[in-house]
Image: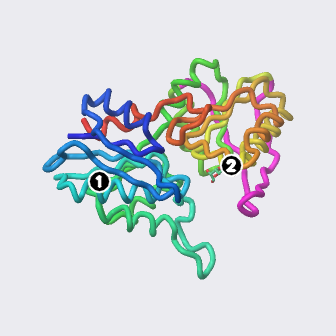
């Protein structure tokens, strides 16, 4: 068995290699002056099971994944497993309007071409797994996020919308605290509305948990509501920290105590490692 980490997911690949005691393949990768990607596997992987680890965000990393998959296939691997820590384009999982692509399906079709198994973490909706023509599974970062939050004396976990309720409930059970949710309506890609709601957050340490922080709008509005209801400290935690545009500024201005993300997308907020959530699939 070998593990190959794409440039978007080097640390996750290293962690998996250590935990599973599977070597990282020796590879060469670089970008040509025109930004095209070059890749070469130096080890003989013929007849081996190879795990490729690569987040498909931003777009450059998608092409990189396709080239890694092709290199592994061309080198005669027996089995190819693809770990996609953050599966980009998963949110366009249906045609919301006529004429749109089903982006998650387009991605899944192409990734399935050179894959025997696909594993991804906290996809926005589980049904995207059905778009793969190969076996596809998801795993959850919530237990690892909850372990981190437990050290912060959290009194309540909040879901910013009903879609995140199960995650909040699961985290609250691990931490041993209350949970609640907000009512969110999405107006468009950058505008959301969070309805004011009675929240028992007076003087409490609250953590809001979600799958993705993109523009930070959802979290910022939720923080404001909590602060209005007298929350003491508000933490925000997500699996995938995209932090688009001025998301970080929005969160700090709203009064966020700490921003926590996993390393599915590497950033200075990647305080929680995702590898422990993936390991059970390979044991
Ligand atoms: C949407 O339902 C997701 O779970 C997140 O709440 C959303 O992607 C966050 O986006 P933003 O940070 O732009 O509000």
* Residue at 78%, 39% in the rendered image: 249
Local SS, label 2 = loop
Residue position marked by numbered label 1 in the rendering: 117
Marker disc for residue 48: none
What is the span of residues highlighted in magenta in the rendered image? 175-202
Drawn side of residue 107 relative to residue 57, left or right: left
Across and down, in percent, residue 186 comes to: 72, 59
Q: Farthest residue in the right direction?
A: 228
| Mark 2 surroundings: few (<14), some (14-19) or many (≥20) residues within 10 A | few
- How far apart are the alpha carbons under marks 1 and 2? 30 Å
Q: Quadrant of the C terminus?
A: top left
Residue position marked by numbered label 2 in the rendering: 244
Work out whether 207 lies above or below 151.
Answer: below
Image quadrant where residue 201 sits: top right
User: How many marks on residues?
Assistant: 2
Across and down, in percent, residue 273 comes to: 47, 30
Work out whether 4 lies above or below 61.
Answer: above
Drawn side of residue 74 relative to residue 113, left or right: left
Local SS, label 1 = strand
């Amino acid at each position: 068995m070998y593990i190959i980490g794409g440039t978007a997911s080097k640390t996750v690949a290293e962690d998996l290699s250590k935990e599973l005691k599977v070597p990282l393949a020796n590879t060469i990768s670089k970008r040509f002056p025109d930004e095209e990607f070059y890749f070469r596997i130096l080890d003989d992987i013929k007849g081996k099971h190879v795990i490729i680890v690569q987040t498909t965000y931003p777009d450059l990393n998608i092409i990189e994944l396709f080239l890694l998959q092709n290199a592994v296939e061309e080198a005669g691997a027996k089995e190819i497993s693809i770990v996609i820590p953050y599966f980009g384009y998963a949110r366009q999982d249906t045609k919301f309007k006529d004429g749109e692509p089903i982006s998650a399906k387009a991605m899944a079709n192409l990734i399935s071409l050179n894959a025997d198994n696909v594993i991804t973490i906290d996809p926005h909706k589980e049904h995207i797994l059905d778009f793969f023509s190969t076996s596809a599974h998801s795993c959850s970062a919530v237990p690892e996020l909850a372990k981190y939050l437990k050290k912060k004396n959290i009194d309540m976990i909040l879901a910013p919308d009903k879609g995140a309720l199960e995650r909040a409930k699961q985290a609250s059970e691990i931490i041993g605290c209350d949970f609640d949710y907000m009512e969110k309506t999405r107006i468009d890609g950058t505008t959301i509305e969070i309805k004011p709601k009675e929240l028992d957050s007076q003087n409490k340490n609250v953590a809001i948990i979600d799958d993705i922080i993109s523009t930070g709008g959802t979290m910022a509005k939720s923080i404001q509501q909590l602060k209005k209801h007298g929350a003491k400290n508000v933490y925000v935690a997500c699996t995938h920290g995209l932090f688009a545009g001025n998301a970080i500024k929005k969160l700090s201005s709203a009064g966020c105590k700490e921003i926590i993300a996993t390393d599915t997308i590497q950033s200075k907020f990647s305080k929680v490692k995702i590898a422990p959530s993936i390991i059970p699939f390979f044991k």
